[in-house]
């Protein structure tokens, strides 16, 4: 039931409502609709990238890692990832699409289990004080991922 319907029913039932009360109710409805605006998302332009293909190709994976670590050129996809990496860490990936969040989870799990050296390089750059590691430990554990202390 939308706010205007509620306001109409409210008006019919209670003729004693003052004009000020109606204005407050209208203001409440307006503010509720404005504050309910969804958070902007990162572009979904690259959501169709096959993460598994990157993980299975050591050369391709290393190219992305080199991009993130400022050791090599970035593909358009790599640049997009690099541009949003810090923000995604700071906001808990709240602007990530479902595909990006799933891809990040897959990537993190793979790096922790099979590419520990790359994981360490990335965490040394993006989380040198271990702030994000500590913040996301419980969330990772819920998904079956144990974040290493080193």
Image (cartoon, rainbow, N blue to C red):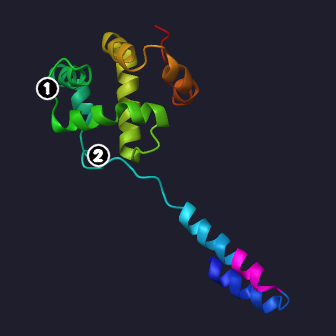
Q: Is residue 21 left or right of residue 87?
A: right
User: Residue under circle 2?
Assistant: 47
CA distance for labels 2 and 1 = 21 Å
Front tag of 2 and 1:
1
Task: Give how far across and how far down residue 127 sits, in percent.
Answer: 43, 18
User: Residue under circle 1?
Assistant: 73
Task: Give how far across and how far down residue 99 sits, in percent.
Answer: 36, 44
Name the residue: 73% across, 87% down: 9
Name the residue: 30% across, 49% down: 43
| Quarter location, residue 52 | top left
Q: Is residue 1 visible?
A: no
Q: Is residue 80 left or right of residue 29?
A: left
Q: Is residue 71 left or right of residue 34?
A: left
The segment highlighted magenta reads: 17-24
**Against 130, is 29 above or below?**
below
Q: Which of 142 and 69 lies nearest the eye of the viewer?
A: 69
Q: Locate the N terminus and report the quarter of the image it occupies.
A: bottom right
**Against 102, is 17 above or below?**
below
Q: Main secondary structure of the magenta part?
A: helix
Task: Give how far across and how far down residue 139 sits, in percent.
Answer: 55, 30
**Against 6, is 79 above or below?**
above
């Amino acid at each position: 039931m939308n706010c205007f319907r509620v306001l109409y029913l409210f008006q019919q039932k209670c003729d004693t409502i003052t004009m000020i009360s109606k204005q407050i109710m209208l203001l409440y409805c307006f503010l509720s609709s404005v504050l309910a605006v969804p958070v902007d998302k990162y572009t979904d332009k690259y959501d169709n990238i096959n993460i598994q293909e990157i993980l299975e190709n050591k050369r391709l994976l290393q190219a992305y890692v080199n991009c993130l670590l400022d050791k090599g050129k970035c593909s358009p996809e790599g640049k997009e990832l690099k541009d949003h990496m810090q923000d995604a860490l700071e906001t808990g990936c709240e602007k990530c699409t479902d595909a990006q969040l799933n891809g990040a989870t897959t990537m993190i799990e793979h790096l922790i289990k099979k590419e520990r050296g790359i994981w360490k390089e990335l965490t040394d750059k993006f989380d040198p004080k271990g702030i994000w590691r500590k913040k996301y430990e419980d969330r990772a554990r819920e998904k079956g991922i144990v974040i290493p202390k080193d």
